[in-house]
Image (cartoon, rainbow, N blue to C red):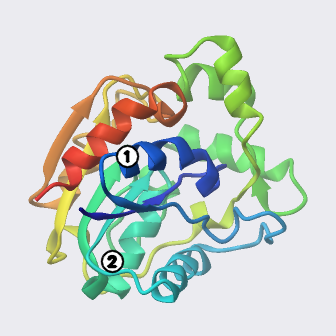
Amino acid sequence: MANYVLIHGAWHTGAELGRVASLIRSMGHDVHAPTIKGNRPGDSKATGLAEAVGSIIEYLEEIDAKDIILVGHSYGGMVITGVADRIPHRIRRLVYWNAFVPNDGESLLDMSLPHQVAAMEALAAEQKDGSIMVPFPLWREAFMNDADLETVQEAYSKLNPHPMQTFRDKISLSTNPADMKVGKSYINCTEDIAASHSHPWHPRLSEKLGLFRLVQISGSHEICFTSPARIARAIVEAGRD
């Protein structure tokens, strides 16, 4: 039995990983799926990256979690990197699931193409509370390109505005991921075009992990909605000893 902690991506809460968590539990493992500060109902959308990372550290310390397989999806890769740097004694393995892998001093925007950054800043400028929301056409074509319209609409209805400052903030690390003394894995969904295929998740970001295990499966960025059983099995494969 292993202890998995699933960290969601932007526009999500831990609830959106509920089906995946249940499937991993059915395989005999403990699973937690907390919500990052800034994404919880009523949270300030002025939340920055350091506060987001700190909220997961506080959660893990509160439940006294140890020997953790810490899984980060998309933006969640920023968070799990910061957590592992601060409390490495609690971490057994890091699993990046089509996730950003930052080195010290990098932001999520630093790992995005200039036209993507410009588009995100333009979307954020439309809001008055410091948040950003993914437009439905982008969600349908780039994030859930393996799903029918009804499934896409249902998933989109569960999203919430994300604090833009977490994308802008540069992470502060004492150790870059490649040098962290924990196991590392990267799950790559091969139909994921939320990051363009000319600027891909893997190997562009995965290679920053140094020595790592690669698990590749078919699916889009939001496979948690379209094939939760497939991503649950991949997470367990990525987390095994």
Residue at the (55%, 24%) spot, across then down: 144
Q: Is residue 58 above or below residue 208?
A: below
Q: Quadrant of residue 153?
A: top right
Residue at the (17%, 73%) spot, across then down: 182
Which residue is tagged 2? 84
Residue 93 in view, yes or no: yes
Secondary structure beneath disc 1? helix
Q: Mark 2, residues whose alpha carbon is within 10 Å: few (<14), some, or many (≥20)?
A: many
Q: 148 left or right of 204?
A: right
Residue 26 numbered mark, or none: 1
Image location of residue 83, percent across then percent down: 40, 77
In the rendered image, the residue lying farthest to the top is 148
Q: Quadrant of residue 228?
A: top left
Image location of residue 211, percent across then percent down: 9, 59
Q: Is 213 in front, or is 141?
A: 213
Secondary structure beneath disc 2? helix
Q: How many marks?
A: 2
Q: Is residue 218 above or below residue 211?
A: above
Image location of residue 27, percent across then percent down: 30, 47
Q: Is 48 in front, or is 88?
A: 88
Residue at the (53%, 80%) spot, across then down: 59
Residue 199 in view, yes or no: no
Q: Is residue 204 above or below residue 239?
A: above
